[in-house]
Amino acid sequence: MIQFINTALTQSALGRFGGLLGVTLTLTAAARLLHLAPDRPSLLAAAAFSLMIGATLFFWERRLPIALLAVCALIATRSATLGQLNGHLQPGILLFICGMMMITGALRELGLFSWIIQRVITSPRLNGPLFTAILCFLSALLSAVTGEIAAITVMLTLVFQVCDTLHLRAAPFVVITVIATNIGSAATLLGNPVSVCIAGKADLTFWDFSLHATPAVFLSLCAVTLLFLLRYRAPIGEMTRAMRERQAEKRPLGPLLQPPCKSGMILLIATLFLLALNHQIARLIGLRDPADLKALLMVTPAAIAAIRMLHCSPDSRQAMLRNINGSMLFFFATLFAIAGALQTTGVTAAIAEAIHAHTSPAFMPAALLGTAALGSAFVDNIIFVSAFSPVIQQLAAETPAYAPLWKPLLFGACFGGNITVIGSTANIIAIGMLRRRAPSRLYFWEWIGTGLTATALTLLIAWLFI
């Protein structure tokens, strides 16, 4: 039996390695045949980026060491210098993400997320449809203001608590939560690394970004909520019946606690206030240059987190530091470096030239929206955005009509992540949390059917806005 298991694991590893090699060679050969990488440095840069795509698809848990090896290979073959790669590391974006990680850790330690869960489970008139609507809008709101990772962990804690108490299958409500979280992450630049990257590349303030993105996100959320109420009416109806029985017996949906939330609420409001008024604050202190305005925006969360750490207990300070995902930040740094190598070696310019030659400005938004959605369905959306951001910058510099292309890139990357289970970080976290629960399973076709329908609906709404 042990020998059979070892043989199966070896065959599985070989199959994944074959898939990694196949994706890398296919994409690299395509770049050469399409004359996007005509010389050796550009071809190696394309191969390094293709390797990262393959690693994301077949070796998710080992994508960081594979990315590091790709960076080392670029330097060793002199396809890119260390100085060139260092210029593309995007320290402002990394610092922004790191600051938000620490703030999220502080919010969790201050009891804000526990308070939110308590408010939901103690609602006196809670039923299946109301719980589903709360799940959708609260997941989107938390994703927009604290990030998709914090939102999915908090909301799935709520889902599992309610479903375990009522002895219901959690999988349908997990799908609802993940899709709503991904949609909400496009509303502000706090939602996910994709939003931060796009805001940084497009020089958008927090307010400008939110004004452009939030209306489309809100309408998309309303549409998918109605979709969920129809598609999952059987499990939602079963939840209503179970809730009524429990309410008749006057039994709560979970342990009743009174976690403190005042300090956490103040911290969250202060963060949103300072980010929303960041542009005005910058001008008040004499900053006028766009680069200085962008820099102040990127360091604001880190500054707020630092001030919080100066005035909190050692335990709270450690809780904030523990929430920093170092491997994720390191992966983003290597990703930005390899995407920068594409730009340095001319691959980005070749792609932009090909798009400019074969696509009209009128058709380009719809084409990019669909391409970003399909790309993000099978590759982590931050990888897709990192590759296409320099392309859009080049197009916008050459043709002003291409300047609004940030919107289809944002909506396509965030909404398209709902198609498959590997489309976004929130999806992968949700599947991992669900797999650790023995009674719960989520079937592939159950996800893909809902994900495709929700993505088509939200992309249509986004296209009408664009």
Image (spheres, rainbow, N blue to C red):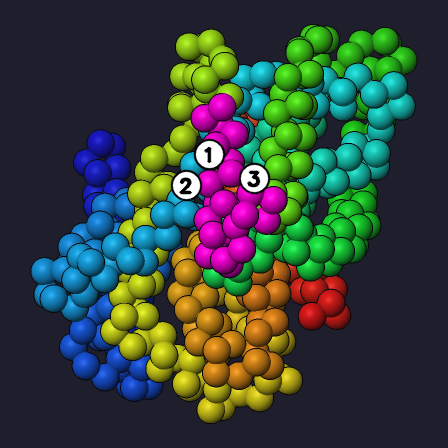
Mark 3 near mark 1, Cβ–Cβ under 8 Å? no
Q: Which mark is residue 95?
A: 2
Q: Classify residue 388 by image quadrant.
A: bottom left
Give the labeled residue for mark 3.
147
Single out the residue that lies furthest toward the front.
286
Task: Give the alpha-carbon distance from disc 2 to disc 3, as whole Å.
Answer: 15 Å
Which mark sits nearer the N-terminus, 3 or 1? 3
Which contiguous range is marked in magenta? Answer: 283-307
SS of the residue under disc 1: helix
Name the residue tied to disc 1.
302
> Of the residues under marks 1 and 2, which one precedes in the sequence?
2
Q: CA distance from mark 1 to mark 2?
A: 7 Å
The residue that appears at 21% across and 38% down in the rendered structure is: 6
Q: Residue 106 or 132: which is nearer the viewer? A: 106
Pointer 2 with pointer 3, Cβ within 8 A: no
- For the N terminus, which image quadrant? top left
Q: Nearer the viewer, mark 3 or mark 1?
A: 1
Towards the viewer: 239 or 330: 330
Which quarter of the image is occupied by the C terminus?
bottom right
